[in-house]
Image (spheres, rainbow, N blue to C red):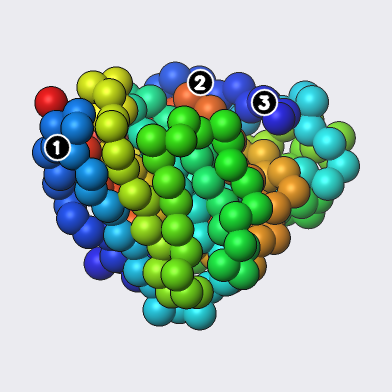
């Protein structure tokens, strides 16, 4: 069992749909992360939030919009995605934005039709 | 971002030690060395991290070369549940992790 919970586990959406991915942790962590992982590739960092503020955006297209409403919750809003955006989206958290362990969820597998 | 180089795959027998090498010749003085592993259909799992000194925890040991240009993750007694992709990562400021290709470990019974 993971301490970082991601919902939904699977999502299929059309290119014109708007959907959101949700990530929740109750470990009191103040840094949260979004990663994207294509099949048979390593995870790639997308965004980092530190103390509810966006601290790193790895030049991610604007069709991905992150949001951190509070210290326990991280959302990723999706709009007008492309088929190449189909991937596993992983959320992680860490106690703070320093060099400590990150705890990952098991991801949302996203398919764009 | 500083890069790491790992073998693509390694095989081990169950209950034997596994030594996973990682080269990171461009490491900077403030980079931590992190190891994560990813089992099939799961998110990555933290294994261990260190800066200069060797580190031990319940999962593994991390041996860091004196010049810090390489490191080795040691699994003391491999089990079938240790079959995974192991990533060696240099952690830059802000805990930004840049994953490399990783080493796929196969454990044979």
Residue under pointer 3: B3
- Of helix, strand and loop, which one carries label 2? loop
Q: Examine the image and state in which quarter residue B12 appears.
A: top left
Give the residue furthest to the front: A16
Residue under pointer 1: A13
Q: Can residue B61 be seen by looking at this rendering?
A: no
Q: Residue at x 30, y 39 (%)?
A: A79
Q: Can residue A51 be seen by looking at this rendering?
A: yes
Residue A107 screen position, x and y as percent: 29, 49
Q: In the image, A38: left or right of A28?
A: left
What chain is tagged by disc 3? B
Q: Compared with residue A28, is residue B81 higher up or lower down, i.e. above or below?
A: above
What chain is tagged by disc 1? A
Front position in the image: A109 or A39: A109
Residue B25 screen position, x and y as percent: 77, 24
Q: Residue at x 47, y 74 (%)?
A: A70
Assess disc 3: are there few (<14), some (14-19) or many (≥20) residues with their C-alpha within 10 Å of its C-alpha: some
Kindly report the distance in space between the C-alpha atoms of the residues bearing marks 3 and 2: 14 Å
The C terminus of chain B - image quarter: top left
Residue under pointer 2: B7
Residue A108 screen position, x and y as percent: 24, 47
Labels 3 and 2 share a subunit: yes
Q: Examine the image and state in which quarter residue A13 appears.
A: top left
Front position in the image: A41 or B40: A41
Labels 3 and 1 share a subunit: no
Kindly report the distance in space between the C-alpha atoms of the residues bearing marks 3 and 1: 35 Å
The N terminus of chain B - image quarter: top right
Kindly report the distance in space between the C-alpha atoms of the residues bearing marks 2 and 1: 37 Å
Q: Residue at x 61, y 69 (%)?
A: A51
Front position in the image: B16 or B41: B41
What chain is tagged by disc 2? B
């Amino acid at each position: 069992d993971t301490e970082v919970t991601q919902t939904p586990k699977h999502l299929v959406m059309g290119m014109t749909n708007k959907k959101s991915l949700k990530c929740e942790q109750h470990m009191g962590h103040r840094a949260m992360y979004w990663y994207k992982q294509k099949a048979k590739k390593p995870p790639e960092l997308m965004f980092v939030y530190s103390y509810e503020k966006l601290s790193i955006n790895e030049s991610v297209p604007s069709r991905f919009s992150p949001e951190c409403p509070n210290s326990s919750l991280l959302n990723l809003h999706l709009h007008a995605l492309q088929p190449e955006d189909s991937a596993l989206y992983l959320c992680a958290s860490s106690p703070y934005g320093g060099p400590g362990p990150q705890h990952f969820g098991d991801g949302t597998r996203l398919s764009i039709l | 971002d500083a890069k790491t180089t790992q073998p693509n795959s390694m095989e081990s027998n169950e209950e034997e030690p596994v030594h996973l090498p990682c080269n990171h010749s461009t490491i900077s003085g403030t980079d931590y060395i992190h190891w994560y592993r990813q089992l099939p259909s799961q998110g990555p799992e933290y294994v261990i991290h260190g800066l200069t000194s060797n580190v031990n925890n319940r999962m593994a040991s991390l041996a860091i070369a004196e010049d810090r240009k390489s490191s080795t993750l040691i699994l003391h007694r491999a089990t079938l549940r240790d079959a995974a992709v192991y990533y060696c990562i240099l952690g830059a400021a802000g805990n930004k992790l840049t994953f490399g290709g990783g080493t796929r470990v196969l454990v044979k019974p």
